[in-house]
Every structure is written in C-alpha cells, then in structure tokens.
Image (tube, rainbow, N blue to C red):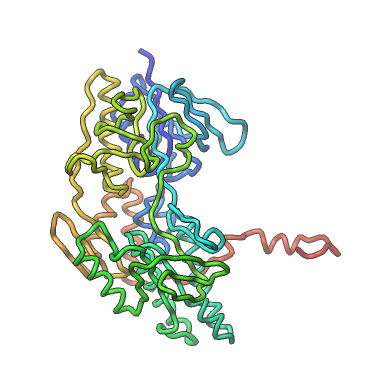
Amino acid sequence: MNPKRILVVGAGHVGLYAALRLSKKLSSREAEVIVVDPQPHMTYQPFLPEAAAGNISPRHSVVPLRRELRRCKVVAGTVTRIEHERKVATVQPIIGPAREIAYDHVIVAPGSVSRTLPIPGLHEQGIGFKTIGEAIYLRNHVLDRLDVAAVTPDPDVRRSALTFTFVGGGYAGIEALAEMEDMARDALRYYPELKPEDMRWVLVEATQRVLPEVDRDMGAYTVQQLLKRNMDIRLDTRLESCVDGVVKLSDGDSFRSDTIVWTAGVKPSPMLDATDFPRDERRRVTCIPTLQVVDGDRVVEGAWSAGDCAAVPDLTKEPGNFCSPSAQHAVRQAARMADNIANVIRGREPVNYKHKHVGSVASLGLHKGVAQVYGIKMTGWPAWFMHRTYHMSRIPSFNRKVRVVVDWSLAFFLKREVVALGQLHDPREEFVEASQPVGAPRV
C-alpha cells in the first residue's frame, strides 16, 4: 500500500513529541511525516526563566528539529491555510512562492500566543515571555537598565529604570519575576552606585491569588516569599494604562516603569482562523478524548489536535471540564495522539486520553521554589530541586539533558554571568554607521 502522509502543523511540545513518536512507531512503508514550523527549533518553555536569568545557556533551552526528527521531513515555513475538506494545507516557505501540501492525516498544533487586552500603551511598551527571543531580550533589557541607573544623575530616570513591572500571576509571571529579580540582585555586586532597595519589582494580578494551579496555601506562601524580598505584590488589581511607560493601575496608583512584562494568559494561535476546523467559544479546536477533531457529534476523519489550541475533555474530572494548557498535558497528549494515528493506519481503534494532573512545580529563583506533586507540598530548596529534576527529565533528547546538567553543575562553582548583550537586538547599527558614504546625512 502507499504510505500515508501525516502533516504536523507546528513543532512545539505537541508537534515535536508527536512527530518523534510517529517516526519511531511507523515504518517508511506505512507513513511519511512532514513537520512545518517557521522556527528551526522547539522551545522548552519551562526553561525560559532560567535561560533569561543566566542559569542555563539560551541555546540549551531549545531543541533543534532537524537533529531530533531525522526520519521526518522538516519544512521551514508557515502554514497559512488548511482546507481539510480537500485535505490540503497551504505552506509559505521562508523564501519562494507558497505551495500546497496534500495529506491523509493532519496534526493541528500551532500552540498559543499571548492573550492581550486593549490596554493603552501595552502594544508599544510591553514585552511577552513565550519565546527564547523574548527571554534573551528581557535579560539584556534588565541588565541595561542597571547600567542606565548607575550612571544617570537624574533621580526620576533612575527610579524609572529600576522599576520592573510584571502583569500576570500564573507560573510564567511568577517564575519570570522571581528569576529576574534574583539575577538583578546578584548583578548589583558589580554596581557600587546601586543598592537592592533602589530596585522596585511589581507584580500586578487581576485575581485575588497567584499560582491558581496549586492550593491557596501554596499561593499564599509564594506571595509571602516575594514580599520578604521587598517585592510589590498587587492582587485584585488591573493594569489600565502604560502609555509612554507610565503605569496606571485600577487601585489608583501610578508610576513610571521602563520594563513592562505581560504574562497574563494565552489564547489559541490566530493561524486557526485560516482553517475550516470547528472551534469552541474560546476559539480552540473541538476534540473528543481520542484527540480527534469533532464537529458536533461527527468525527472529522484524518484531523487531530492537542495542546494549547485544543479543547480536550478531561476524563478525570466532571463532564464539561477540559485539560489545562500545560506542558504536562501536551507531551502526554502528543504520545497518545501518535499512538492513535498509528492505530487508525493499522486498522485499529483509537484510545481515549486520560491523565490526572500530578501537580505543579515552580522556581522562585536560585535555590528557592514551591511544589505540589501527588498531594505532597514542598517549599524552598527541596521544591527548587524537584523543579529542576522534573524539567531536566522532560526536555527532549539526551544531548539537551547533558548540556543543561553541565550548565547547572558549573553554576555551583562559577558566578552567574550578568553581562548584557544588547547589540544582539540591532547588530547592524555599528556597521551601518561606519559604512555611510562620505558627506551622506546621518540616519
């Protein structure tokens, strides 16, 4: 028989794990796996805070697609349209005209993007924390603000430079805030002009608690630990404006901040708007527990989805509940989905996905953390160690596991790197300036 063509849209947690498992379970006579993603790597997002803080090399928090998916065909491009009725996807390569790729099965896993609100100034002043580029930029920006504060004679400029505002008290926001404060505090040993109390770290959370994935007492512990580090925690407070860097909050407070980090939730990738798949009220692809796309009561043959962009029923809870958009579910859904696709190709029945959330772990900086796993609650060093151990075990490939462990081991003996490489964000500036024709106006 002719091999089935399986198209994987997106190479995040779901796409990479599913493609890797399919390439191992199915022979080349049974299936051809094509992975389409504009990036040449998968980002292991739980390591973004550690990469931003300099605990691990940024390159070690990403997994190269071509090295890991050697039995798959990797296409560097963007899926701009999917017509499942024809079983065809339109792909725009990095260079060249768009082309259509026909398929027998499609895995729709473009993931999610930051869920923003129409807040004045947010578009111009804010930065997200979902990609390795954003993590590197934030690290360089924070260290650059320390340099600005150390040399300026203007107290208002210094105060603005040393005010760091994070919006969103979920795992991404708490870990980013805690790790960046920890890094900046370490860096101050090289800035005799600055004192730790000069810095102001602000967390703005619209609800009355942080870390909603864990029990309230663990969230309260986290707030207490952040308060002990002199952080400004604003619960039940919303960001109303940040025009020109002036942060205005719903509690009436207003202050200038050069750094505004938005981590207040995610939404399904807008790429799904260019497909004919059924969606729910939150714009997620509707699925049944086998991870097959479903339109009402009708299974959409050959269409599969999982992860942040999919509404997958959680069979461990009451009807009407869906799996949370977490890496814990994504990697397990990817494995179940790959096995189900293999079952269908071989004429067998797909199996329901069912996984009870085992808990959560979070880092609050070097040697500090909070964890709730299988009902067991831990704080401090044990929780931090569990956080590192768990994520080291989950990142794909032996190569990356070794490199991450080496980074951590070296950190026990060597001080953290706290140098900003701001030129990375505009590398041609110096050359453009130097190569200006004689007499040409400066730009």
Q: For this rendering, which residue is in front, 224 or 437?
A: 224
Please name the residue shown 62% across and 59% down the image.
427
Residue 73 in the image: state x and y as whole percent. 44, 31
Please name the residue shown 34% across and 80% down the image.
230
Q: Residue lying furthest top in this view?
A: 1
Please name the residue shown 36% across and 55% down the image.
403
Query: Compared with residue 62, is residue 253 higher up or lower down, i.e. above or below?
Result: below
Judge whether residue 322 can be spotted in this image. yes
Q: Where's the C terminus, which quadrant?
A: bottom right
Judge whether residue 179 can be spotted in this image. no
Residue 184 in the image: state x and y as whole percent. 42, 74
Query: Compared with residue 304, is residue 13 higher up or lower down, i.e. above or below?
Result: below
Q: Quadrant of residue 296?
A: top left
Q: Is residue 366 left or right of residue 124?
A: left
Q: Is residue 377 left or right of residue 387?
A: left
Residue 437 in the image: state x and y as whole percent. 82, 60
Q: Quadrant of residue 289?
A: top left
Residue 214 in the image: state x and y as whole percent. 22, 59
Q: Residue lying furthest right in this view?
A: 439
